[in-house]
Amino acid sequence: MTIWDILLQQIINGVSLGAMYALLALGFTMVYGIIELINFAHFNVFMVGSFVGLWVLQAMGIVGQGHPLYGLALIGVLLTALVVTMLITGVIGVAIERIALRPMRNVPGTAAMITTIGVSYILFNFILLGAGADSKNYANPLPSVHWEIGEAVLRLREVLVWAVAFGLMLGLNFFVRRTKMGKAMQATAQDQEAASMMGVDVDRVVVIAFFLGSALAGAAGLIFGLYYNYTSFIIGYTAGLRAFTAAVLGGIGNIPGAMLGGILIGLIESLGGQFLAVRWTDVIIFSILVLVLVFRPAGILGRAAPSRS
Amino acid sequence: MVAASLDRPRRTLAAWRERVRTPAGRRIALAAITAAAFAFPLIDRNDGDVDAAANALAFAILALGLNIVVGFAGLLDLGYAAFFAIGAYTYGILASYQVQPEWSSFWEPLQWLGLVARLPGAGGPDHVHFTVSFWLMLPVSALVAAFFGILFGAPTLRLKGDYLAIVTLGFGEIVPIVARNTPSLTNGAAGLNGVAPPNLFGYAFGVESLPYYYLGLTLLVFLIFVSVRLRDSRIGRAWMAIREDEIAAEAMGINRSRLKLLAFAVGAAFAGMTGTFYVAKLQTATPEMFSFPVSVMVLVMVVLGGMGSVAGVVLGALILQLLQSWFLQDLSQWIHALGRGTGIAFLEQIELVQSIELIFGIILVVMMLYRREGLVPAQRTVTVLSHAEQTAVPARGGISGEFALAARRSVDPATPLLEVKGLRKAYGGIKALQDLDMVVMPGSIVAVIGPNGSGKTTLFNLITGMVRPDAGTVRLAGEDITALAPHLIVERGIARTFQNLRLFANMTVTDNVLVGTHARTATGLLGAVIRSPRVRREEEAARKRAAGVLAIFGNRLLPRVAHLARTLSYANRRRLEIARALVSQPALLLLDEPTAGMNPTETLELTDQIRSLRERGITILLIEHKLNVVNEIADTVIVLDHGEKIAEGRPEEVHRNEEVLRAYLGRTAARAAP
């Protein structure tokens, strides 16, 4: 393999990881944009999504990776898994908002953030206690189709990841920019009070942001399982921290920024892992977070900047 | 009948509680708890129990440290275990066989000091064995951890508090990774081994738990003392002011970057010390001992006990630790037995020990939803006021009685106290202030009036350094103070109030005013802990001055000095803001709509009081919408409209000014007026 093949391969890997981080980052960014809250529960909504996806696939009779499906059957199974997973995690997100976070909405200080940590811990331990600590072999109906570009390999699963992620992101972008609810969401992010005076139901906007963000996290969880062929109760922490970095890197509160940040973090992870050292990946990504916060707190695309308090 | 019988024990409990709350009662209770803590290992001779108790003490210290960051200063630190790790490894590396450089003459003076020993090499060169004393390392680890606290906190200072949470989370993740990835220093994932136990006057601590228990208890008592001293000091009040309202804290002379870093450093120092203690006790250190769940556990302790409450967090830590090591196993057994007895299979499967993190999560959520102040709230509720105390008699005639308000700088009556030249500020396309010139002479009252959005509050923000001007200068008695940091401007003698009230809501009236003395006092971290005679005198003087300033408003604020600011009426909040600004001994006082929300009697009362302030040498610049107030007290009126000065002069002149009438009443009215 030449250096170029390796580079191409790592870019393919990086964009795939990045697409997943981007989906996850969108949830952080939407919630932060609207109620200025870092939602730590999001870490483990993603993890739960990965398990829900596994259970849905298993319920449809998929076991392990030995029995690939083709054609319409494949699309049908994947689409069903995706939709059901997203609905379930979306509902979990809404439940979290309604039960734990709405009473905290106007409480100043760190109370709401601490609550999200508690919720995150509860989700984490539910899965740990319910499903066990061992990592789970994922149910994967994807055939091992791949294409060779030079010596780099592009697998079907990567194409799938890209298609799902970009499809969802385009859908979200359409929703936020073109629909009435999306515009209400933008207005609420700018000025909650003014939006509510203009007749926007802020509570509803927040609920929808949680639903969409959590549904996207569920999709990211399913993608994680299909991509790596395993899932485990611990995956939320690392992925969540990276996705949050992606959101900050792109400009928190900024939806295209989260997508861009996600792809960049994915590339940094794969290229950094290849050319530096895997065991330092977290240190590298985290250093990026700190450097962005210090030198460009508004992120690459800026706009909804983390304000000085 | 039933109600009465239920009522009785409650009433005796309340009476008992009252008795404990007297100073003498508290002292007795404290002495009893301390005695019990010292006697505990003599009563319970089971080494396992003592060991668990010693560990619980270590976590109580961690909770105390985190309480300084989260509870006092309001900064959420999710990577607190990082500092615990740093303290542990600092001692672990310098008191074990892990690092053994080759022997050279460089090490000889250190050997003489007892910091290293010479290891004869088997056939090869001799090596160095670090043997630094535990007692030396306790403070050194604290300092090393404090240094890292400043290092980790610095990147987030300019940002909103939430970012601190995520950055500390990241650092909390990185420190164990670094420990794992640098095996030459830390022995990687396998962990440091053979860390030397402490040695006190020839008594080696060894592996038994008893001496560690007493050492931990001593450290805990010491750090409780430090926490309490800090809480009740200038430093502690500044931390709480930052927690309550950063902008108001800055406007009262607090250097918020510095104090936030200080909170971070002190919290880290507590953890560093605990790390050293803990690693000496276990004689080993692995990266897993300091991972994210440890940080969360300490946070749960603080939340459970009560953020900001010293007694609370210690209690929270002890409850959670002892719950884990003493009770959960038994509790599980009981639940299993219950399951067997009732035939409910589900109960037989519950393993509480493994569910501890689930319990932590539930504690966090439930406490936040239902009892945010924790088991032992930091602020106690205050007794009700008597009828006489509640009724205030409106007083005319301004301020009587004496209180020292002497401004710090001597003012030359001939030079302008405040001189603003060409001041300009635009927000996007909106020109909030355009090339404003104005002068305030010493001893005068200048009123700024103008329609909403005419730039009045922007002017105040520019003068006090809260907003940077695009162009222009601000001079105070000839000195250029343009765009200085707000706390430096307070030091130079300008204090302000806010139009939309920025009090420190969860601090008492007295403490709110005491925060105002921050710029005029000097007590530092060590001073606050040691409380030397000089510090005592300073604190006493500050309290006296605060009481004097509160007395300005008669019995409006005085009966309420122990109340939380958020419980005050609107008018009293305005008065408290003025008191808080006055106590910083300003030469120039900026009042932003001081009479807003006051009824006519209260307005008259305050008008007189403002006039008295001027008589006592304070120059006043005021924004006011009530023109009768302006007419009554202002020497000069400046009228702003769309960021421009459209008129200036004595009140009656300004009233006749056509442009002013147009700005206020519209064009036709201006034509009809004369």
Image: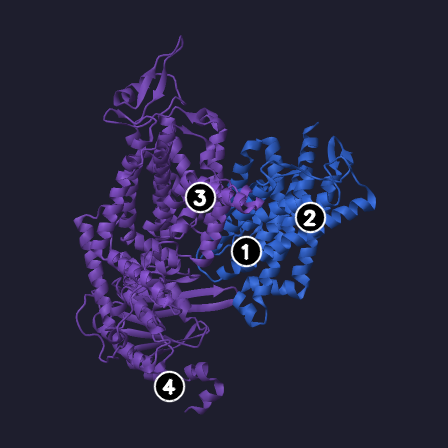
Chain colours: A blue, B purple
Q: Which amino acid does label 1 sit on?
A: Tyr
Q: Mark 3 points at which residue?
A: B297
Q: Which amino acid does label 4 sit on?
A: Arg
Disc 1 from disc 3: Cα separation: 25 Å
Badge 3 density bin: few <14, some 14–19, many ≥20, Cα 10 Å: many
**Dividing the image into 4 quarters, which one contains the N terminus of chain B?**
bottom left
The residue sitting at 40% across, 71% down in the picture is: B456
Of marks 3 and 4, which one's residue comes earlier in the chain?
3
Badge 4 density bin: few <14, some 14–19, many ≥20, Cα 10 Å: few
Badge 1 density bin: few <14, some 14–19, many ≥20, Cα 10 Å: many
Q: Name the residue under label 4.
A: B656
Q: Mark 1 points at which residue?
A: A32
Disc 1 from disc 2: Cα separation: 21 Å
Name the chain letter of the residue that bears numbered label 2.
A
Q: Nearer the viewer, mark 1 or mark 3?
A: 3
Q: Do labels 1 and 2 share a chain?
A: yes
In the rendered structure, the answer to whether residue B388 lies left or right of residue B194 reads left
Q: What residue type is labelled 3?
A: Met
In the rendered structure, the answer to whether residue A203 lies left or right of residue A147 reads left
Disc 2 from disc 4: Cα separation: 68 Å
